[in-house]
Amino acid sequence: MIEAQRMVWCGRGWQTALYASGFAHQHVSDTCNQSESSRLIRLGPEQSIHKAAKLANFCTLPKTLEPETYLTDEDYLTVTLHFSDLRCEVSASGLDRVKDRALAGRFSTVWAAITRLVPEPAQ
């Protein structure tokens, strides 16, 4: 199973769980308008996420990637990978300002693979 989450200060945040069965569940919460919705999505092959995670050595990333400077309304991203005997979770914010660009790039590779399969909801 793979989980991805975008937490926002004000707007549409979401949580998505991608399952080996070929489905994903996405829950969207609008923190400003106090509205919520959920949907079930049929997926294509999720091998691209596993491949991206392996190539990016995702599970060797630090638990948190933080920028050198912070913005008060910045989105916070989290990806959790559940493999047969391994669970790893990495969170990030301000990826464009993370000092170690290579680490930010590795996280972004996996994030992009997830959002290609299950696009982020429209803002």
Image (cartoon, rainbow, N blue to C red):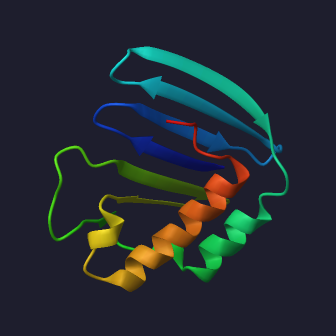
Who is closer to the viewer here, 46 or 98? 98
Q: In percent of the image, x 16 and y 58: which residue is there?
A: 70
Side (left or right) of 1 relative to 22: left
Side (left or right) of 82 relative to 32: right
The single residue placed furthest to the top in the displayed view is: 34
**Residue 85 visible at all:** no
Q: In percent of the image, x 29 and y 62: which residue is there?
A: 94
Q: Is 117 located above or below residue 30 in the figure?
A: below
In the rendered image, residue 92, in percent from the top left (x then y), is placed at: 35, 60
Q: Quadrant of residue 9?
A: top left
In the rendered image, residue 85, in percent from the top left (x then y), is placed at: 62, 62
Side (left or right) of 31 relative to 38: left
Q: Is 99 located above or below residue 46 in the figure?
A: below
Q: Is 104 located above or below residue 112 in the figure?
A: below
**Residue 109 visible at all:** yes
Q: In percent of the image, x 58 and y 44: which residue is there?
A: 120
In the rendered image, residue 121, in percent from the top left (x then y), is placed at: 58, 37
In the rendered image, residue 6, in percent from the top left (x then y), is placed at: 44, 44
